[in-house]
Image (cartoon, coloured by chain):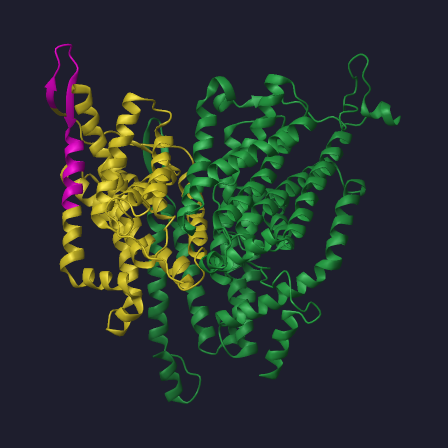
Chain colours: A yellow, B green
Amino acid sequence: MEYFLQQLINGLTLGAIYGLIAIGYTMVYGIIGMINFAHGEIYMIGAFIAVISFIVLGAAGITWVPIMLLLVLIISMVFTSIYGWTIERLAYRPLRGSFRLAPLISAIGMSIFLQNYVQLVQGARVKPMPPMIQGGFTVMERADGFAVSISYLQIIIILLTTALMAGFTLLITRTELGRAQRACEQDKTMAGLLGVNVDRTISLTFVLGAALAAVAGVMVTLYYGVIDFFIGFLAGVKAFTAAVLGGIGSLPGAMLGGLLIGLIEAFWSAYFSIEYKDVATFTILVLVLIFRPTGLLGKPEIEKV
Amino acid sequence: MTALASQQSGRPGLDLPAMLKEAGVTALIALALTFPLVGLRTVDVGSRLTVSPRFTEVAIAVALVFIGRIGLILTREKQALPVLVVSLGVAAAAWFLPFPSAALKVIAIAGALIIAIRAAITARSDRSTLSQQERDRAMDRLGARVQDAAVWIGPIAILFAIVLPFMPFANRSVVDIGILILTYIMLGWGLNIVVGLAGLLDLGYVAFYAVGAYSYALLAHYFDFSFWLCLPLAGLLAATSGVILGFPVLRLRGDYFAIVTLGFGEIIRIVLLNWGVFTGGPNGISGIPRPSFFGIADFERRPPEGEIAFHQLFGIAFDPMHRIIFLYYLILALALCVNLFTMRIRKLPVGRAWEALREDDIACTSLGINRTNIKLAAFAIAAMFGGFAGSFFATRQGFISPESFTFIESAIILAIVVLGGMGSQIGVVVAALIIIGLPEAFRELAEYRMLAFGMGMVLIMVWRPRGLLAHRDPTILLHPKRSARQQQADSEAGE
């Protein structure tokens, strides 16, 4: 029971991170119907910028953790968003209206490019980060000394994710931008005719997705303490699985899917084998796509000639 | 806005502030992109991580972007000729100027050349770029011409490939590169069946390559099977795995299918990595037996008692090159088999069904084509060829490990198919020569290989989504004498 509870906490933390990345996939898929394969790389770039800005801020003498964390979040979100915007502008926009697989192939190329770019400019070695936020609560303790603990960092991650997701839901449901986005999702031509700037809306979608991925990157840097240029690939595929599991195109679905994938991974590692945890994720992806292609909360898609 | 201003002034005047603003914004974005990642490099100092600044690189990169953007604006504003001259001059100057890193030099030269090309096009046609349609038509024409030329280019290329090992310049490394390129050509042709003909984007083709390689390695390791027995077995096992994997996923739509195949590729790699007792785990399998000369003779200097070696059989002096050349011909023969098979099967009902499925899924179903079975056939056949190539890879290397079968390998094979033009057999050859051959020729730039490769994929997609030499002629025509291409040419002439 205690062991289970501990895995639940770990799984929720992991799931929160996956959920943040999954939103980027689901939004882009919803609006232009492509799998943004380079989104995992965006998250990786967010993590790298986080590490760099932690070091720079530390050197500049800003060491009070809350301020530091806030600044790192903002810096990482801003710079990563610019990456998201540029990628859309250069690699995807010219391909709008091209045949279906072209943007996906372009995205794969972009993903390879970004991975190697970061490897070249930042080196191939793993980047360690000293733990920034330490300590935590002991929730309960078993007679034999096994303690269920939740660290402050885990609390921060879960709270911040919840806040971001709430804010994001508001943004999509209540603001003009959200309305424009939902309109483009339904019918781009019509939305354009009615005065929605379609190109700008799509760009902003990429910017928002990249900003959320950057937050996930900052979290992962803090949580695991090491990053390298290759973390984007697996995280990307897992977040995509989360988006598919929740129903691609659906925002609550992405959050739910992210949490589920995080939990599955944590429990699988805890009770079965840690080596095969990635196989578990991929198997879920395959099973969901075969038996419920619309995901848990997705709408069925009608195929038209 | 700027165009309007220049029209009003009556001469090709330039709106300098607007131009500077546009270029400045671009430069600012370039600054934001490069400043944290390029400008601040993280380095280990002792056990701690610090950053070392590299602002010169950033400054040069931003300056290059600024100048490049101004060049593009000037081209757009009908100043093509000066831009052409200047950009060619810049490219030449960049060749000799010292740059802090080779990457910047390449960017400067390539950027200047691209602007020069655009300026040249503008100078000729009075427009800065060709429209997508014109570009497509021009490239289609080229593709069709290459396709016609393939009638005589093909045999010449094959002849060249056959005599290559006996050319005076063919030393060991040349033949080795030849083997490598041919392996990728074979893989490309195999994947072309799935991607080019059936129109399914398979991101996990390397899984079948791995199945083939491990089939041979494990059969040889545990049962002492020979290569010639294992080759068909490996193909069979790979095809079986193709059917098993393909059956559940072939109902999925395009991009879902792509991701699921990627997942399968990763699953196979992770299983190979972690099933240590059976597959050797991350250490892989070494000491895989080399192929014999069709089971008759080995390529050994001193064969075991009672057996005869290749050089003894033919009464020539021992030379380690014999084995390499034999491997070369082996992969050449395998690759040509794949090609011949594809060329023939395209004309069969199943091949025509693939191409029809690629063009329109739903229309095919309504005409009574069983989608799943037809796709499954493509998947299984391609998997079989991947398996053949895999077992060849195992016997050539003598050592395999899961490291050889990562996603990037799938991406390279896919890039060969996509770059060459989906469905074009000769395109695969051209693309394999470019993607595999060029980096071998420029060894000193090896670390930029994957970078250029990713960028190439994006550029090709943006520039010509169907690939360089793609052609969409029907394989079979009702009136073969009057081909569709001629008809199209006639109708264009009539317009």
Relative to residue A184, is residue B117 drawn left or right? right
Spot the residue most to the top.
A144
Is residue B19 placed above or below A247 in the rendered structure? below
What residue lies at 65% left-to-right and 31% top-to-bottom? B231
Q: Is residue B353 visible?
A: yes
Is residue A17 placed above or below B402 in the rendered structure? below
Q: Quadrant of residue B29?
A: bottom left
Asked whether A123 or B281 is in front, the reply is B281
Q: Residue B257: percent from the left, percent from the top?
A: 42, 46
Membership of A242 in magenta stretch: no
Membership of A163 in magenta stretch: yes
Q: Residue A30: percent from the left, percent from the top?
A: 29, 55
Q: Is residue A64 visible?
A: no
What residue lies at 27% left-to-right and 74% top-to-bottom? A193
Is residue A15 placed above or below B62 in the rendered structure? above
Q: Residue B412: percent from the left, percent from the top?
A: 53, 44
Asked whether B405 or A298 is in front, the reply is A298
Q: Quadrant of residue A49?
A: top left
Q: Quadrant of the C terminus of chain A?
A: bottom left
What residue lies at 36% left-to-right and 47% top-to-bottom? B39
Q: Quadrant of the N terminus of chain A?
A: top left
Asked whether B217 or B338 is in front, the reply is B338
Part of the protein shown in magenta:
A138-164
Q: Residue B189: percent from the left, percent from the top?
A: 61, 47
Asked whether A289 or B58 is in front, the reply is A289
